């Protein structure tokens, strides 16, 4: 009986081992075989990988890749018709993009093309998790790279596992080079003017804010510095953020940006770590001799806070920033490929919107969706970004739209009432929670009454009644 069991296990082991080796050899060999097959001479495939930024959220109809195609005359590169292959996916991470690319390329052997990479904004990495030896070892196994997420799940029984940023990014680069696709890379960024989500230093934050909002700027700055030097605080993201806002008030833009980057280094939810992640992207560009558009460096040289001037929320670029990314890639492509395009200085943004069928109704939807989404952030979001909300309210009042598509404008007034009341009630925990509960319920009712599901089909609102504001 024991021998039978041993034989069964040995047979299973041999079958699994042979199967793994077969697929390992197959996955390693096919890309090189595919490169021998002639490609379509009439179509220029352009692969677009990425997260919601690459999708174009919250605009939907506008993204840097769609702009790139729209401004290219006759929609042709090297006299071939551009065909965008949209492998990007909102909310995904590098692993999912790798799987999307694997499935498409192994099933389309003749579709050799250009790859545009503005990716990594959802991986939120702060440091290397693998040694160089371990990373290189894992990168040599095609089967492991396909199944690593599930292998880790079996090991840790948890899908929310940290991944090594360079390993996840390099997987995509290596496979694209095997298939012979022409890779172009961009560094990434987020809105660092946006407050970090959640913290454990509410009392200390209040002390800084009371000084700052009462125009005691120097005292607020010194308190931030003292708290940053205090070793008892492990999470200093909110202190760095507030120091950045204070330095912005003093018009010390470069120092302010540096402080805001340090904040993101502690708390990277919602936006990428600008220093670590971009250094990895630059490293891979050098390692594999890939043309790089240093988008983040351009923002740093702009003389502005890397915030709402470039982004419409925590991480999604506004239309002008999508245009900048598109022309960054165009500049790289024009050095190798022949094609005519509308020069950036000659671009008419309103004409571009018409080409992409983006109208006032779409813009109203975008603004309203951001207001609703911001409502589920923390109190600092409302406190520090009141000017943004008032600007959006003014924009909505000026946009001429189909009244059947624009939600009840009374919602905006109720939202602003909500954020204005917070300053008055934040010192009274019991009364404050009661008022917050009432206002939250009131706003939930307005959402249900005035917003259809299709109106915000690209926004994840979370669960009704579980607003982060209610938990504070």
Image (spheres, rainbow, N blue to C red):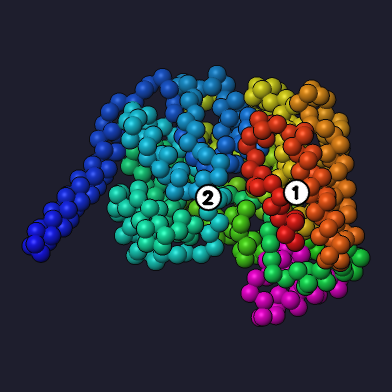
Q: Position of residue 174 (x, y in %)?
A: 37, 47
Quick one: 412 or 104, which is closer to the camera?
412
Magenta stretch, main secondary structure, is helix
Q: Residue at x 29, y 34 (%)?
A: 35
State the SS at label 1. Answer: loop
- Rendered location of residue 360, percent (x, y): 76, 26
> Mark 2 — residue?
120
Residue at (76% x, 26% y) in the render: 405
- Kind of element beneath mark 2: loop
Residues at circles 2 and 1 in contact by the CB criterion of under 8 Å: no
Tell me which label, 2 or 1, sits earlier in the chain: 2
Q: Which image quarter: residue 237?
A: bottom right
- One can see residue 59 in this view: no
Kindly tell me whether residue 17 is visible in this rendering.
yes
The quarter in which the C terminus is drawn is bottom right
Q: Is residue 42 above or below residue 164?
A: above
Q: Nearer the viewer, residue 434 or 375?
A: 434
Q: Residues within 10 Å of mark 1 (few under 14, many from 20)?
A: many
User: Residue 375 — which label?
Assistant: 1
């Amino acid at each position: 009986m024991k021998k039978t069991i041993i034989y069964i296990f040995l047979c299973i082991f041999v079958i699994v081992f042979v199967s793994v080796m077969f697929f390992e050899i197959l996955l390693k060999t096919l890309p090189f075989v595919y490169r021998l097959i002639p490609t379509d001479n009439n179509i220029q495939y352009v692969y677009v990988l990425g997260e919601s930024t690459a999708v174009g959220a919250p605009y939907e109809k506008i993204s840097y890749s769609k702009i790139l195609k729209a401004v290219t005359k006759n929609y042709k590169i090297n006299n071939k018709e551009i065909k965008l292959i949209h492998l990007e996916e909102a909310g995904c991470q590098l692993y999912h993009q790798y799987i999307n690319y694997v499935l498409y390329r192994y099933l389309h052997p003749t579709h050799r093309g250009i790859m545009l990479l503005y990716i990594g904004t959802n991986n939120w990495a702060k440091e290397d998790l693998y040694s160089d030896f371990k990373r290189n070892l894992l990168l040599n196994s095609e089967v492991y790279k396909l199944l690593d997420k599930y292998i880790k799940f079996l090991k840790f029984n948890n899908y929310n596992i940290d991944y090594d940023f360079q390993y996840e990014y390099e997987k995509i680069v290596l496979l694209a080079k095997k298939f012979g696709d022409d890779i172009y890379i961009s560094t990434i960024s987020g809105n660092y003017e946006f407050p970090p989500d959640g913290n454990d230093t509410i009392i200390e934050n209040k002390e800084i804010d009371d000084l700052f909002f009462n125009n005691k700027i120097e005292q607020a700055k010194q308190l931030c510095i003292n708290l940053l030097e205090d070793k008892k605080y492990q999470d200093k993201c909110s202190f760095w953020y507030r120091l950045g806002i204070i330095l912005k008030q003093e018009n010390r833009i470069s120092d302010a940006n540096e402080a805001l980057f340090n904040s993101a280094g502690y708390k990277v939810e919602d936006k990428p770590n600008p220093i670590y992640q971009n250094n990895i992207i630059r490293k891979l560009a050098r390692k594999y001799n890939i043309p790089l558009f240093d988008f983040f460096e351009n923002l740093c040289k702009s003389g502005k806070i890397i915030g709402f001037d470039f982004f419409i929320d925590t991480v999604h670029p506004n239309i002008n920033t999508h245009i900048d990314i598109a022309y960054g890639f165009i500049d790289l492509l024009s050095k190798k490929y022949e094609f005519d395009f509308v020069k950036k200085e000659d671009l008419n943004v309103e004409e571009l919107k018409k080409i992409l069928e983006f109208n006032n109704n779409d813009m109203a939807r975008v603004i309203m969706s951001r207001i609703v989404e911001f409502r589920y952030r923390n109190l600092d979001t409302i406190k520090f970004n009141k000017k943004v909300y008032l600007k959006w309210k003014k924009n909505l009042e000026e946009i001429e739209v189909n009244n059947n598509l624009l939600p009840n404008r009374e919602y905006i007034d109720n939202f602003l009432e909500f954020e204005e009341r917070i300053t008055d009630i934040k010192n009274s925990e019991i009364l404050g929670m009661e008022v917050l509960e009432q206002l939250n319920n009131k706003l939930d009712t307005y959402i249900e009454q005035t917003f259809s599901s299709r109106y915000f089909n690209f926004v994840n609102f979370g669960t009704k009644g579980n607003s982060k504001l209610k938990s504070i």
